[in-house]
Image (tube, rainbow, N blue to C red):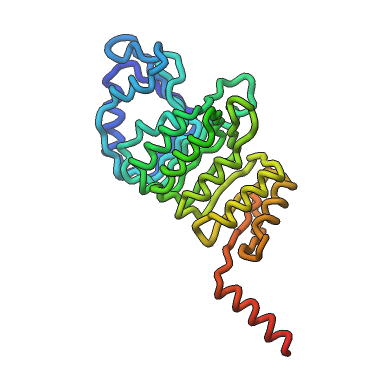
Amino acid sequence: ISFFMFKEEGSLPVFLAFLQSTSVRDLVLANCRLHMAIHDGRLSRLGRHDDSVAELLTFLPHFSCPGIVFLRLGGFQVTVNERVALRGPHLLPFLGGFSHLSDLDLSLEKTCVGNTNSNPLIIDDKTLVTFFQTLSMNFRTLQSLKVSYWRISLEECDKTLRTIGRCLKTCSLSYLKCNGLVVTDSIHRCSLEHLFLQTAVVNLSYLSWLSIVGVALSPGQGAGLGKCIRERFPGTLLELSAKDVGTEAIKSLISSLEEGGKIEVLYVGGPSCNLRIHRMLKNQKLRGKFRRFTSLKE
């Protein structure tokens, strides 16, 4: 883990000036820590209020970094006056200057899930909606998004996921990585990961690869996701990374996908246990029937 510390207000503009002038296309700040220990001036009060994210955003100078295409911020955190202020979804509003991003990683630390010694970020309805609204408005050229180990707690699940679905329709994402994702109902404490994944599958028109490694699904949830892909996925080919999802859940998912003979599922394997899901076109099915007919004649 690398640590950076800003002690003066003028440090941030200098850092942004460096980013604007660099020829780097792939910026890796994964697991880095940026500490802002500023006790004088306008930024001195940051970290003492619940709205420190909004406050910090008002002090961010305008910047433009069109040259950076890959931005890797998995596990990256900004601490303001000894308080963790920015990580995961809260970082997105500060990235508007990266106007040509193709790949963005905003994953949280893996230890944030299930570790009693950590201070996990719980993402609520408002935070999640704000994130995807910002994504749809300002990052429409983004092709790859990684949100692994996010812990989401929804109070109004149906309403929130409908809003997110509308946002995703305008996105160009072809790769979505949700490894270790946890989504729960804040009232009934039931798991909702399958509903979040279904929202993505239905509304991302260009989606070709979905990674759900470590997302625990029940057999019923697996069957529901399979049915959703079979009936509502807009594409013809989807790669699914499904390691540690659950053996029975995968069996149910594949069985649901193959129901009706419209979907062909191929186990590709690899370290992430990839499945290749291919929607059969009408002429392909006809060719298959013709081959079977000719073999019978012979």
Tell me which residue sits at (54%, 34%) in the image. 157
Judged left or right of residue 46, residue 128 is right
* Position of the C terminus by quadrant: bottom right
Tell me which residue sits at (29%, 40%) in the image. 65
Q: Quadrant of residue 182?
A: top right
Residue 282: x %, y % from top left: 56, 72
Q: Residue 32, can we see it?
A: no
Q: Quadrant of residue 192?
A: top right
With respect to residue 203, does 193 lie above or below?
above
- Residue occupying the far bottom of the picture: 298
Q: How many marks?
A: 0
Residue 121: x %, y % from top left: 52, 25
Tell me which residue sits at (26%, 21%) in the image. 10
Tell me which residue sits at (60%, 25%) in the image. 187
With respect to residue 242, does 89 lie above or below?
above
With respect to residue 47, does 72 lie above or below?
below
Judged left or right of residue 154, residue 79 is left
Q: Quadrant of residue 33?
A: top left
**136 or 2, which lies in front?**
136
Residue 98: x %, y % from top left: 33, 40
**45 or 183, which lies in front?**
183
Q: Residue 220, can we see it?
A: yes
With respect to residue 253, does 99 lie above or below?
above
Residue 188: x %, y % from top left: 63, 27
